[in-house]
Image (cartoon, grey):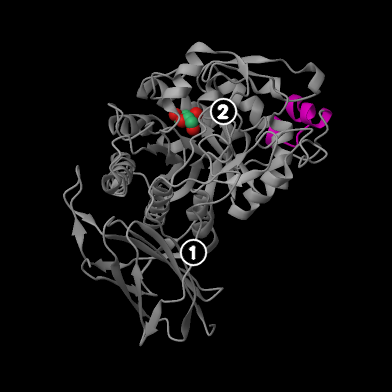
Amino acid sequence: MAEITKMVVDKDYVISKIDDRIYGSFIEHLGRAVYNGIYQPGHPAADEMGFRKDVIELVKELNVPIVRYPGGNFVSNFRWEDSVGPREDRRTRLDLAWRTLEPNEIGINEFTKWAKKADTDIMMAVNLGTRGTADALNLLEYCNLDTPSYYADLRRKHGDKDPYNIKLWCMGNEMDGPWQMGHKTATEYGRLAAETAKAMKAMDRSIETVVCGSSFVGMPTFGSWEAGVLDEAYDYVDYVSLHQYWGNQKNDTADFFAVTDDLEFFLRSVIAACDFVKGKKHSNKTINLSFDEWNVWYHSNDQDNADMENMPWRLHPHLLEDHYTYEDAIVDGLALIKFIQHSDRVKVACLAQLVNVIAPIMTEDDGPAWKQTIFYPFYLVSKYGRGYALQPVIKGGDHATSTHDHVSDIEAVPVYDPEKERIAIFAVNRNVDENVTFEVDLRGFEGFKVTEFSALEGTDMKAVNSAAGENVKPVHRSDAKLDNGVLSAVLKPASFNVLVLEKGRD
Ligand code: AHR
């Protein structure tokens, strides 16, 4: 048995109110995310607009407050005008990012309706790759303005009297990446993002803007990119984006679970870059973080690269359809814990993506929608992780992995919801061999009782779910003890756990 891990939680040690938008997600025009994902006319589950109701139900179960759209790499070669107005006039275009055909059957008009049905808001990305400020302004006018002016009129002509009121706007996507259409240097991009955000805010003072950070922490320009872009754009943007995907290519589960330590480095470095520029500029404004792409992504890479090379220009092919394992679900749970720990600066985060493409929700073309393993940690944290993040003090055992010397056995964070009088503790046992006894000293929570103990527990790290059934789903335990304000539970090796306590309830 590994060393006991002890955690002290005090009601008064607040990190931050959690911004619900950290439970955001992402839908890109890519593979089967849109076509045969959220939209499949003729499918038995399709509604009158062709949207799959089974998918909408699962999205609602995840309670996703915001969805980034329409890309991703796709947006850097997207002409938004092609995706609005009468369908018979819409043009099929080449999507250069994924080397597929985009029929534009679903576009901004339809996606705003889908978002309403799914109870979510849109985080819209503008094309700063092959296009620029003027097109971004036209799109903003089309979406948000109620003026008697050309693009607002055009939206009304297209049947949508009321503006869409989209509040959060991404200034392009991954512009640091050489793979991006219209890739730029930090200064080139920083200037364009600054001028675009400035003009967009002149048009609609209610919007917030996200400037592109690095595509991942390992980019050669990481750090200098953030500082360089913010040097140009600081005054006009509200968030800097972070993207990161993880993979267990080495088949080394213990080291895979240490990704949160690398994530800690990533987050701290970007916060430092933001605050460095703030200091340089003697600014009162603080730039926060939008972690608007994150997930495990590696299972499908080789196949996708071969298919994009050998079979280009298909309509909605199977692309980026990672089939997630048990251990992938644990990593996603770890990432969510990290975002909550940094909720004073991470205000938006988008699980990439939502449907079929590196997604928690999958669809069978001729069958049902189903839940991948990674559905469950997101579901549990989105359900119970609303309210205030509390600063835990954790002391316990650690272990070494192949590339990390000291990996704490337990990663954990408490979240307190004063309205519901509920505290939820999310904890992952990263020790892949041993149980860990977890003791939580709950200070200021008199009269609270354990009302739920749900866990993802498993010994087969490669277990997967499918349309035929779920091998990975939460188990409900009843063996957590609360004695004199000390909660204790034995956390299984490689497990994700949620302990919920509520006042005056059993
Ligand atoms: O989510 C898949 C892709 O990953 C996105 O299009 C891009 O932004 C990132 O590289």
- What amino acid type should be assigned to the residue bearing mark 1? Val
Q: Is mark 2 within 8 Å of ligand 1?
A: no
Q: Position of residue 292 (x, y in %)?
A: 47, 40
Magenta part of the protein: which range?
142-157
Look at the image and say whether residue 367 sits in the magenta stretch. no
**Residue 255 visible somewhere in the drawing:** yes
Q: Quadrant of residue 491?
A: bottom left
Q: How many marks?
A: 2
Residue at 61% x, 22% y: name it: 135
Look at the image and say whether residue 145 sits in the magenta stretch. yes
Location of residue 52 with respect to 489 vertically, above or below: above
**Residue 172 visible somewhere in the drawing:** no
Q: Do callouts 1 and 2 mark residues in contact (Cβ within 8 Å)?
A: no
Residue for badge 1: 475
Left or right: where does residue 160 sit relative to residue 362?
right
Location of residue 482 with respect to 79 vertically, above or below: below
Left or right: where does residue 95 sit relative to residue 368?
left
Residue for badge 2: 126
Q: Position of residue 184 (x, y in %)?
A: 40, 19
Of the image marks 1 and 2, the number of the one nearer the N terminus: 2
* Magenta segment main secondary structure: helix
Residue at 74% x, 38% y: name it: 51
SS label for mark 1: strand
